[in-house]
Image (cartoon, helix red, strand yellow):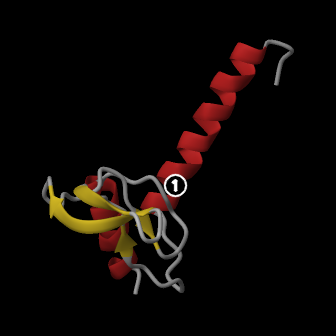
Amino acid sequence: MTDDPESNLAEWKETMQEEHEEAIRNPDPDADHEIEGVTQVNYRVYFEYDPGTDSLERTRREQVDELTDPELLGCRCGVRGMTPEEATEHLRVAREKR
């Protein structure tokens, strides 16, 4: 590493990207591999004021969008931040190594 922070950051990013790609292409054959992701569905929530408790009480909710697949996925083995294509490759290679 150099004294130049920009250069150090670029070098660090390159190293991390190489490690990430290696983890995708070379999964641990002894680890459990299951792909997971987190997504969110939004709801509109309605409230009414309850003077007896001086609070808002939820009266109803309605879903405002549909469930979508997440853009980035992770594997139970610890590899995170994979695209669906990378996750597919990761699982394919893991199964080939068995």
Measuring 44% from the left and 70% from the top, which residue is drawn there? 75
Which residue position holds label 1? 22
Q: Where is residue 38 in the image (x, y as percent from the top left)?
A: 37, 63
Horizontal side of residue 75 vs 83, given as left or right:
right
Q: Crowding near pointer 1: few (<14 within 10 Å), some, many (20+)?
A: few
- Residue 41, picture quadrant: bottom left
Q: Position of residue 35 (x, y in %)?
A: 36, 72
Quadrant of the drawing holding the C terminus: bottom left
Horizontal side of residue 10 vs 27, given as left or right:
right
Mark 1 residue type: Glu
Q: In this view, does 28 lie above or below 46?
A: below
Measuring 34% from the left and 81% from the top, which residue is drawn there? 95
Q: Where is residue 85 in the image (x, y as percent from the top left)?
A: 26, 54
Q: Nearer the viewer, residue 78 or 97?
A: 78
Q: In this view, does 86 lie above or below 7?
A: below
- Residue 43, picture quadrant: bottom left
- Residue 62, picture quadrant: bottom left
